[in-house]
Image (tube, rainbow, N blue to C red):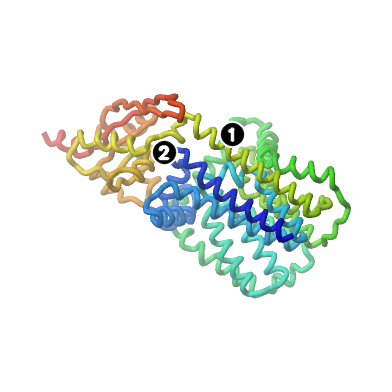
Amino acid sequence: MQKLTKKFVYLLIFSFAVWSLVPMLRLSLSMDTQEAIVWGKYCQWGTTKHPPFSGWIAYAWYVLFGHGDKAMYALSQIFVTLGVVYIYKLARCFLNQLRAILATALQFGIIYYGYSTPEFNVNVISVGLWPMCAYYFWRGYTQNKWRDWLLFGILVGLNLLNKYVGAMLLIALGFFVISDRNIIKLIKNIKVYIAATVVILLLAPHVWWLWQNDFEAFKYISQRNHGGSITSFWGHFVYPLKFVMAQILFALPALLTFACFWQHHKSDDFTGTSTQSRFICCTALLPAATFALICLLSGNAAKSMWGFPCLFMWGTALFYFLPFNVDEKVAGRFLNVMFVWVTLFALAYGVQCVVTTSQRYRTDVQSVTASLEQKWAERTDKPLKYTGADVWFGDIMALYASHEIKPMIWMSPKNNPWFDKADFEQSGALLIATDNGEYASYRARYGAAVSTPQKMTLEFTNYFGKTKEKEILYGFYTPWEVENAEEK
């Protein structure tokens, strides 16, 4: 068993190392990662997309490593590894050590625990926080210790400060509580109310921020939820099916691995209790099922990546309800397969980084920001303080320019409430747009203060020298020029 435990630890280390290093083949961080860093720098208790926790973590880590963007890949793996450790701790509450190790290792066959993790964002943090919340809830529920309930309250608060869909886990836990005969005892438990108070205290500043900013984040959620193209009656059935099938597809390597071993070594030695069974069913199935139900009732689409943290109990559930005979030899082969999956995922990601000419992977951020700064300097001797652009170009300018430049995303002060509107309008901005429609929206909002757009060609070159060109537009928001013209 000691040898097998070491092999499992080596799997954790291998996955951490691979997914911290392979993404360094990219020239530029993902858009979500850059956005999180910028949020952490400028936001306090909220953003117009998500709660603030991911930004706090991202910016603190970014500063800690001297604004080294490559370190962000390791930050993602810290949360993934933290989640995997707590999946194991939770699995040990229901399975023997051997099966708990395999149930946990099985998660590496799900792309949410590998291929998707280089993009540090709220979903990656959720992979760490959801198992922690579930573990301390189970400990509090079964052992009723102050420490567990307090940690549960703190983690739930942080989980909701990270992403609102953390509420899906609370819904699953709520169904479990309702289904259990001890619900009355739980209702009378003062420790539960203390945990709830901790959650409320943690969320209160964010709720106040939302109130002051017209709940802009919920408008973003509504827009994302209406992201489907099917508007007919069939959307009520297509979208939930599409969401569920996406989760199965993303977990397919894990499911196939389990099915293969179960077919050859299946067993009937189920020894669980009804309480354990209900808890595992609720946490493994209800979060994703709730998303599907929302799609079914509303007829709106749900992004497949919203299921990112929902699969944390799938490995435990499979080994709990469909046990198979395991000895150290079988377990060793199982872990070998998981090493193979991690390697294959990493190779696929590495190949993509090497051959792609995608803007999101191959933007030479230093060169682009220097060129755009030069355009501003050629136009005016005023210091460049703001950039009006989409998320991608706005955050690149904010992170890689030679001095501090604040990103006014979509040229909308309402969408960037952390900036001084008066200062923005007095200082002007360098404008960047990816097409004529986007630039036209800037001119429609600010009129004559926005200059005629000019073209700039960017090149994205892969490791084999293949180059793709993209034309962008740039211009200037210079309200003082309009004022001077009017005075004359």
Q: Of 454 and 398, which appears nearest the observer?
A: 398
Q: Is residue 306 left or right of residue 464?
A: right
- The residue positioned 64% from the left and 59% from the top of the image is 86
x and y percentages locating residue 260 in the rendered image? 79, 41
Please say if 375 is above or below 114: above
Find residue 439 and report its image quarter: top left
Residue 236 in the image: above or below residue 336:
above
Residue situated furthest left in the rendering: 488
Q: Amino acid at mark 1?
A: Gly
Q: Nearer the viewer, mark 1 or mark 2?
A: 2
Q: Residues within 10 Å of mark 2 (few under 14, many from 20)?
A: some
Query: Observer-nearest residue: 255 or 168?
Result: 255
What amino acid does circle 2 point to? Answer: Trp
Q: Secondary structure at mark 2?
A: helix
Query: Which residue is at a point 47% across and 31% down the rendered structure image?
Result: 358
Choose between 207 and 286: the one closer to the eye. 286
Q: Is residue 124 left or right of residue 411?
A: right
Give the distance between the C-alpha atoms of the residues marked 1 and 2, in whole angstroms.
23 Å
Q: For the C terminus, which image quadrant?
A: top left
Quadrant of res 408: top left
SS under mark 1: loop
For the point 34% across and 39% down, the residue is 366
In this rendering, position of residue 212 left or right of residue 162: left
Q: Residues within 10 Å of mark 1 (few under 14, many from 20)?
A: some
**Looking at the image, which residue is at 69% across and 67% down?**
139
**Can the viewer see residue 87 in this picture?**
yes
| Residue 427 rendering spot, x and y as whole percentages | 24, 44
Q: Which residue is mark 1?
A: 228
Question: What quarter of the picture does the N terminus occupy?
Answer: bottom right
Give the residue pinned by disc 2.
392
**Residue 43 occupies quadrant:** bottom left
Residue 334 position in % (x across, y down): 74, 47
